[in-house]
Amino acid sequence: MAPGILETNDLTQFSSNAVKLSVFPDGLRTSGQHPPVYSQVRPHKDFPLIHTGPTVWKAEDYRDCPELWTHRFSAEEIREIGRASDEFIRNETPLTGISKQNFPLPNLSVRLEELRKDLIDGKGFFLFRGLPVREWDLQKCATAYMGLGTYLGYFVSQNGRGHVLGHVKDLGEDPTKTDRVRIYRTNARQYFHTDGADFVGLLCIAKSLSGGESDIASTHHVFNTLQESHPDVAQTLCEPNWYFDRKGEVSEGEEEWIRGSIFYLENDRSDSPPRVYAKFDPMNVTSLARFNSGPNARIPPLSEKQKYALDVFEKTCAELSLHMILAPGDIQFLSNAQVFHARTAYTDHPPGAVDEDGLPARRRHLMRLWLAAPESEGGWRLPYHDTLQKKRGGIQVNDTAPVCPLDAE
């Protein structure tokens, strides 16, 4: 898509795209990575001095109250999920074709609808516990997980290979090669960031020997803190002069990077003030040396002001974060709009090791979902041309078909 077309204010022309049903059986194609509509990017002076509402939370509100953000599946709920999974597998429908219609959850669907509302308009995070991942094989785990996901949003592709079921696993790739390695395929630390869709889900299949723990922070609490303590940093993060590396996952005719800001304001809302929205991964900001240095530089390097802002941002998130450890069978759902998340570095079990239950230890493995919650179905009103599309966001390279590998590849 030509960069110039994104200057338009007319979002309706992008609300739907014709797709090949032979490639995208549900008729929906992941929209992919795009710059914002620059005419809708608001300056820092338009942002609220203090963000208010249910999306603002503090770690101390939840640290000692897990009942406010966790739910252990009951035996009946596990049976309901298991029955739906078994029936779906018996019908031999491809996982890419899973939907609420062919994965009925008559009882649990009520809780999932409440969760969806909380993810969009509330605190933006939740943890389910107790999916029997040690008893079920990977196919049944994936089916159950994706079936639950259909009640929250639309699956979008997470990489240039079309993976709508992703896998967070150390594949031995070099985390220092940030220009071409996605950090989720390594055991390195992940700094506070957002993923490329409205929601991200993580199902823990197996945990590491040590590390790999999760930290989350309220985007709006972080924003408020920066506004109060470092207004210069808040302003820097609102300026649309940051460049984000696409790491080669681009369609024909697209640029290798995206220019935007880190904090945005929603498009105007008639019912309430627009909320602050975040879109950021520092690993995609610090990996651009091949484009921003040397005699053939095509984009500017990070300024000292931006480097300082990155440092303050990370420290602020860490100070305000809620820590959690995912055990096998846990499912963490987050909203990228109002929650930043990070991961500590980890070490896997050595070959031949056993876990705490005396079973052969498996390498750390999380199944990942990226889910879209479009504006047309109550989602955030984003300053992007695809805000009305069902499968907005994600990563789409040309017409790569969606696939659901059952393990990392």
Image (spheres, rainbow, N blue to C red):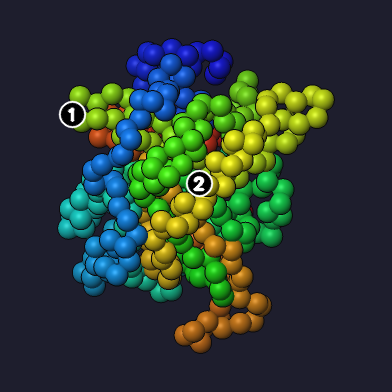
Quarter of the view holding residue 14:
top left
Q: Residue at x 39, y 13 (%)?
A: 9
Q: Is residue 81 left or right of residue 270?
A: right
Mark 2 crowd level (few <14, some 14–19, many ≥20, 10 Å Cα) = many
What amino acid is found at the position of numbered circle 2 in the picture?
Phe
Mark 1 crowd level (few <14, some 14–19, many ≥20, 10 Å Cα) = few
Determine the residue located farthest toward the right in the rendered image.
295
Q: Which mark is residue 313?
A: 2
Q: Earlier in the sequence, mark 1 or mark 2?
A: 1
Q: Residue at x 71, y 23 (%)?
A: 298
Q: Which mark is residue 385?
A: none
Q: Residue at x 71, y 54 (%)?
A: 174
Say which element carries label 2.
helix
Q: State the residue position of label 1.
A: 271
Whether residue 247 appears in this view of the structure is no
Determine the residue located farthest toward the bottom in the rendered image.
358
Classify 294 as above or below 351.
Answer: above
Between circles 1 and 2, the one closer to the viewer is 2
Locate residue 348, reporting x and y percent.
61, 71
Locate residue 349, reporting x and y percent.
61, 75
Quarter of the view holding residue 325:
bottom left
Locate residue 279, reporting x and y percent.
46, 38
Closer to the camera in the image, 25 or 185: 185
What amino acid is found at the position of numbered circle 1 in the picture?
Asp
Closer to the camera in the image, 343 or 3: 343
